[in-house]
Image (spheres, rainbow, N blue to C red):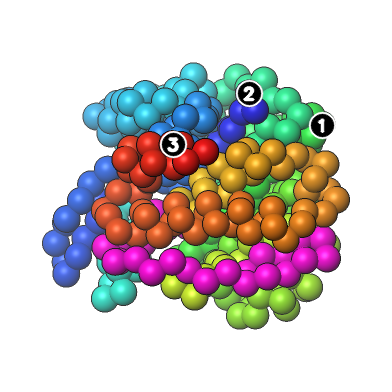
Amino acid sequence: MRKVIGIGETVFDIIFKNGQPISGRPGGSVFNAMISLGRMGQHPLFISEVGEDIVGKTVRQCMTDNDVSTDYMCSIDQCKSAVALAFLDANEHPDYMFYNDYPKDNRLDFTMPDIREDDIVLMGSFFALDPDVHEQLITLLDQARNMHAIVYYDVNFRKNLVWQARHLMPALLENMEYADIIKGSDEDFVNIFDEHDSKQTYDDHVEFFTKNFLFTQGDKGATVYGNGFCKSYPALKAELVSTVGAGDSFNAGIIYGLLKYGITYNDLKGSIDEATWDKVVRCGIEFSAHVCGSLENYVSPDFAARMKASD
């Protein structure tokens, strides 16, 4: 069975609406995707770090409950686990504030997982750019590249990072160098490159690194670029409750689609036909639409059961 390996931050998300907290649960960009994939029966591995506190125990328990391996989780002694405050606006879109007191040194001391050809490695968000853990990330990516595993990079570059864009650019470009699939939202590329157009973003900033580019635009859907391929896909209509986990769930759906339809490393280096892209992207859009209808950051067990029953 092909493995899915995630590397990213863990936080405890507290969601606010009209200035009042309405929900709290473990989160983090890659973490959310791993929980969805665990519920889908993919047994993912997750590399991350937590403090030795109640939040850290809650994160680990959430992973265990949802069939995500905790074997590669690192504990940071005498530090508090990270917390994220997500303030929903009128369109249920979050504005974030992050808090952690992790040290700069001795971070992410994990054992390298057994990575094999066609496994999938997911990275993203600020964690993939953090200078305090970037060396460890590159060690993992080197192993993935050597073994011809698929590297999926969700840039997820939030507006609170814009002031650091120039400083973070070398790490971002290095991550793109390793990526077989690059995914980002319209907002991400405005924040990074001040670029609004998907084709201009692809032509000027992505295609040099990989032919496979997923450009998402919220309720306007997604545009997918491949080797000699470009197609836009509409979003599914959904009753919006929260978009906190929308992009993360899209990633989980795409990865599930890659596995379900047998897309390999060599396929991505070559070309994928339109009918196959249609099926893979449909998974991403369905996962994302479902999560937007709840305060959960991940697909529900009922949704997972329905999807698996239809396979």
Residue marked by disc 1: 146
Magenta stretch: includes residue 245: yes
Q: Position of residue 61 (x, y in %)?
A: 31, 26
Q: Residue at x 58, y 69 (%)?
A: 233
Q: Are marks 1 and 2 in contact (CB under 8 Å)?
A: no
Decide which of 108, 148 is in the foreground and name it. Answer: 148
Amino acid carrying mark 2 in the image? Met
Q: Position of residue 52 (x, y in %)?
A: 32, 25
Decide which of 35, 201 is in the foreground and name it. Answer: 35
Say if residue 120 shows up in the picture: yes
Q: Position of residue 42 (x, y in %)?
A: 52, 30
Q: Position of residue 266 (x, y in %)?
A: 83, 41
Q: Earlier in the sequence, mark 1 or mark 2?
A: 2
Quadrant assignment for the N terminus: top right
Amino acid carrying mark 3 in the image? Ala
Quarter holding residue 190? bottom right
Mark carried by residue 309: 3
Q: Residue at x 73, y 78 (%)?
A: 200
Tell me the distance, in whole angstroms, between the alpha carbons under discs 3 and 2. Answer: 19 Å
Amino acid carrying mark 1 in the image? Asn
